Image (tube, rainbow, N blue to C red):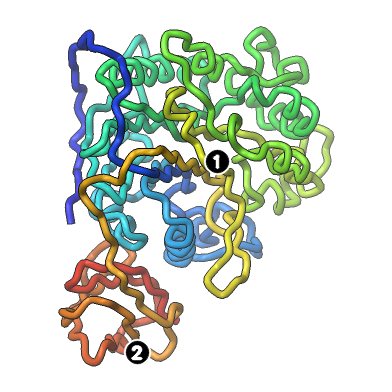
C-alpha cells in the first residue's frame, strides 16, 4: 500500500510556455466524486451535543463511517475529494480509504482548519498547496494532485464559508493552479465545497429557497457571507438575493473555459421537479428537527421544508474538452444497499456528494489495477465468526484495526473464517495478508 503523506509548505514553480494541445489519457473511464463529510462523519453523535436528542439519524461516528464505507463500495468511484476531515490524519485516511478499495491517499493539513483530502484507486502524486499568506489573506484547503500515470490534475477546494472576499481570493489561487497545469498539458478538474451560489441557478434559487434567505437574517449572516455585495445592510435588504460573484469567476474564465458538469450534464429537470436541485443542507441538520430554533418571523424552523433551503454550493468543474467526455453526472441523495433497501445520505453528512464519470474512446491504462475479489460477511457481525469469500489462494492472517486506524490484534485464518468473538462490539477494519481491507460492524 502506498500513501502520500503531506507536510505542507508553499511550493513555488515557474509557469512554462508549452503547447496547450490536450494529450490522450490511458483510461477509458474515470469516475470522480466530491463530498463534504461533516467534521469527519462525527456530527450525528448525540454525545457531541451538536444535534437534538432523538434526532432521527443519530449514530456514533463509527457507525456513520461504516455507512459511508458501504455507500462508497456500492458507488465505486475511482477518485474522491473530501472536505472537513476533522480528526483525520494520514494513517486514518489511509485506513478509511482501504475500506472501500482505494490504496492511495493524500491529506492536506490546513493548519487550524479541518483537513481536505483525496483518495484514489490509481496512484496519485501531490503537486502543491498553500494555507499561508496569499494576496493579502490566508488560504485554506486548496491543493493540487495528479494521477501518476495519466495527465489529469485535481484541484481540491474548501472555500471559506464566512467571508465572500476570502472565497474570491482563494478562487484566484485555484484558477492560477488551473491555468498552470492546463499549460503543462493536463486535463484539470476543480472540485469541492465552494460555499457559493451559481448564477446558473438564479431562477431556481430565487423562486424556491426564500426561507433560507430569511433564516440568514435571524442568524446574522447577511453582511458578508453569500449575499449580494451591493446590499450590505442588516435586515431583509441584505438578503433579497444571493451573491453569484465568486462562481462567476469560474464561468467567465475565458482564457481556458471550463464547465460545471452537474449543471451541464446532470438531469437538472428531474432534480428541480422533485425539489432536489442542491447539495446542502441534508435533513440531518438541526434546522429541520429543533423546535427551539426560531426564524425571523418567530416561527420554529422545524416548520420549514428542505425544498425551502436546499441549494448547490458543491461543484465539480472540468476544462471543456474533458467535460465534454461526461457520460454521467449526478447529485447523490440516496443509494440502494446490497439488501435492496434504500439508505439516505442524510444518515451520514450534511452535504450530498457529487459524482461525474468521464468516458472516452482511448484504451484502458497499460497498467491494470485490479481490486482483490474478496468479501467478508456477515456484516454486521453478531456471532463473532467472520467468513471469507475470495479468489485468493494464499490467505492466512488478518490484522484488525480500530476506527482510529490503530492495530489491535492479528488473527489466523482457518477454513476461510476469522474468529473475532473476543472483540467488543464496535466498528473495525479487517486487513488480510492479500491486501484486501474491509470495514466490519460487530454487534
Residue ID at (34%, 32%): 154
Residue 58 drawn at (x, y percent): 58, 63
Rounded to the nearest whole Å, what is the CA distance between mark 2 and mark 1?
40 Å
* Residue that numbered label 1 is attached to: 329
Which of 432 and 220 lies nearest the eye of the viewer?
432
Q: Verify CB contact (< 8 Å) between mark 2 and mark 1.
A: no
Q: Is residue 94 left or right of residue 174?
A: left
Quarter the N terminus occupies: bottom left
Element under label 1?
Answer: strand
Q: Quadrant of residue 32?
A: top left
- Let me know if residue 274 appears in the view: yes
Q: Badge 2: few (under 14), some or many (20 or more) residues near its Cα, within 10 Å? A: some
Residue 388 drawn at (x, y percent): 32, 82
Residue 331 sits above or below residue 112 on the image: below
Residue 258 sits above or below residue 35 on the image: above
Residue ID at (24%, 41%): 124
Residue ID at (35%, 28%): 142
Residue 385's tag is: 2
Residue ID at (77%, 37%): 295
Q: Quadrant of residue 24?
A: top left
Amino acid at each position: 500500500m502506498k500513501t502520500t503523506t503531506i507536510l505542507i509548505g508553499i511550493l513555488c514553480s515557474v509557469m512554462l510556455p508549452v503547447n496547450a494541445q490536450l494529450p490522450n489519457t490511458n483510461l477509458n473511464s474515470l469516475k470522480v466524486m466530491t463530498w463534504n463529510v461533516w467534521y469527519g462523519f462525527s456530527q450525528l453523535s448525540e454525545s457531541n451535543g451538536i444535534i437534538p436528542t432523538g434526532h432521527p439519524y443519530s449514530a456514533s461516528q463509527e457507525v456513520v463511517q461504516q455507512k459511508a464505507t458501504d455507500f462508497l463500495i456500492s458507488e465505486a468511484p475511482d477518485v474522491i475529494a473530501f472536505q472537513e476531515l476533522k480528526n483525520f490524519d494520514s494513517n486514518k485516511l489511509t485506513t478509511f480509504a482501504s475500506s472501500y478499495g482505494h490504496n492511495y491517499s493524500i491529506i492536506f493539513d490546513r493548519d487550524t482548519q479541518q483537513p481536505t483530502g483525496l483518495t484514489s484507486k490509481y496512484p496519485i502524486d501531490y503537486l502543491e498547496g498553500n494555507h499561508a499568506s496569499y494576496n493579502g489573506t490566508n488560504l485554506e484547503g486548496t491543493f493540487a494532485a495528479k494521477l501518476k500515470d495519466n495527465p489529469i490534475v485535481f484541484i481540491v477546494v474548501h472555500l471559506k464559508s464566512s467571508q465572500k472576499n476570502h472565497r474570491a481570493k482563494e478562487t484566484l489561487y485555484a484558477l492560477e493552479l488551473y491555468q498552470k497545469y492546463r499549460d503543462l498539458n493536463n486535463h484539470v478538474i476543480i472540485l469541492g465545497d465552494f460555499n457559493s451560489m451559481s448564477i446558473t441557478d438564479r431562477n431556481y434559487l430565487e423562486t424556491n429557497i426564500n426561507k433560507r434567505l430569511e433564516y440568514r437574517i435571524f442568524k446574522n449572516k447577511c453582511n458578508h457571507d453569500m449575499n449580494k455585495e451591493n446590499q450590505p445592510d442588516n435586515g431583509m435588504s441584505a438578503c433579497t438575493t444571493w451573491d453569484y460573484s465568486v462562481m462567476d469567476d469560474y464561468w467567465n474564465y475565458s482564457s481556458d473555459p471550463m464547465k460545471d458538469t452537474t449543471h451541464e450534464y446532470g438531469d437538472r429537470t428531474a432534480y428541480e421537479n422533485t425539489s432536489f436541485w442542491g447539495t446542502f443542507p441534508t435533513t440531518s441538520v438541526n434546522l429541520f428537527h429543533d423546535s427551539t430554533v426560531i426564524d425571523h418571523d418567530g416561527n420554529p424552523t422545524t416548520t420549514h421544508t428542505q425544498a425551502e433551503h436546499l441549494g448547490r454550493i458543491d461543484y465539480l468543474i472540468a476544462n471543456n474538452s474533458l467535460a465534454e467526455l461526461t457520460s454521467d453526472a449526478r447529485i447523490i441523495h440516496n443509494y440502494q444497499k446490497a439488501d435492496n433497501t434504500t439508505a439516505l445520505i442524510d444518515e451520514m453528512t450534511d452535504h450530498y456528494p457529487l459524482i461525474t464519470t468521464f468516458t472516452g474512446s482511448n484504451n484502458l491504462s497499460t497498467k491494470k489495477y485490479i481490486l482483490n475479489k474478496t468479501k467478508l460477511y456477515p456484516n454486521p457481525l453478531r456471532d463473532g465468526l467472520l467468513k471469507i469469500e475470495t479468489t485468493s489462494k494464499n490467505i492466512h492472517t488478518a490484522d484488525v484495526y480500530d476506527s482510529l486506524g490503530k492495530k489491535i490484534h492479528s488473527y489466523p485464518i482457518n477454513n476461510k473464517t476469522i474468529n473475532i468473538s473476543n472483540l467488543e462490539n464496535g466498528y473495525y477494519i479487517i486487513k488480510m495478508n492479500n491486501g484486501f481491507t474491509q470495514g466490519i460492524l460487530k454487534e
